[in-house]
Image (tube, rainbow, N blue to C red):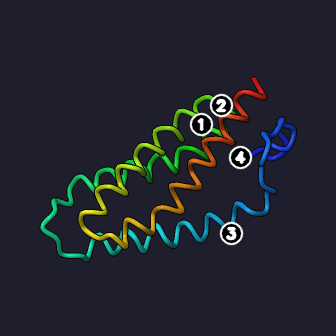
Amino acid sequence: MIDLTWYNELIKPAFSPPSWIFAPVWALLYITIIISFMLFVVKQSGCRKTEGYVWFFVQILLNLLWSPAFFILKNIGLALAIVIFMDIAVFIVIRKFYCVSKFASTLLIPYFAWILYATYLNFGFYLLNR
């Protein structure tokens, strides 16, 4: 169970957004992620797609692991490690998708920017709440 009382009591880093912004931003990002993946799947290309599939599912797994690490385990350090690996994985996905579909790759740039921002926030939470 997610304990929002715990989260609300944390010292927040500078430039932390209001809590209400996360749901609409993630909804929009998940839509672009799905569209990007669908374009990657259906687009015919001379590029090998296997690594793109592997890295896409790695970053999805990391994405799914972050919330339980942060909110359920309340382990800010583990969540930070996960989001750093997610940054790397999404960057690789963008590169792998680019060979197949430049548009599919471009659709992932806002997601990448958001998780870089999330990395900054997570690092701030880690430093401020140790």
User: Residue 121 or 69: which is nearer the viewer?
Assistant: 121
| Depth check, front residue: 74 or 52 | 52
Amino acid type, residue under disc 1 in the picture: Ala
Alpha carbon separation for disc pair 3 and 1: 22 Å
* Local secondary structure at mark 3: helix
The residue tagged 3 is: 24
Q: Are marks 1 and 2 in contact (CB under 8 Å)?
A: yes
Which residue type carries mark 2? Answer: Asn
The alpha-carbon separation of the residues under discs 4 and 2 comes to 14 Å
Disc 1 secondary structure class:
helix
Q: Nearer the viewer, mark 1 or mark 4?
A: 1
Residue 40 is left or right of residue 106, and the answer is left
Image-quadrant location for residue 20: bottom right
**In the image, residue 25 above or below residue 4:** below
The answer to whether residue 34 is above or below residue 126 is: below
Q: Which residue is mark 2?
A: 75
User: Where 49 falls versus 41 (above or below)?
Assistant: above
Q: Is residue 40 shown left or right of residue 11?
A: left
Q: Earlier in the sequence, mark 1 or mark 4?
A: 4
Label 3 packing within 10 angstroms: few (<14), some (14-19), many (20+): few
C-beta proximity under 8 Å, tags 3 and 4: no
Q: Which mark is residue 79?
A: 1
SS for dot 2: loop
Disc 4, SS:
loop
Q: Nearer the viewer, mark 2 or mark 3?
A: 3
Which residue is tagged 4?
1
Q: Nearer the viewer, mark 3 or mark 4?
A: 3
Is the residue marked by circle 1 packed among few (<14), some (14-19), or many (20+) residues within 10 Å? Answer: many
Coordinates of residue 52 in the picture (x, y in percent): 28, 56
**Viewer-nearest of labels 4 and 2?**
2
Residue at image position (63%, 49%) is: 117
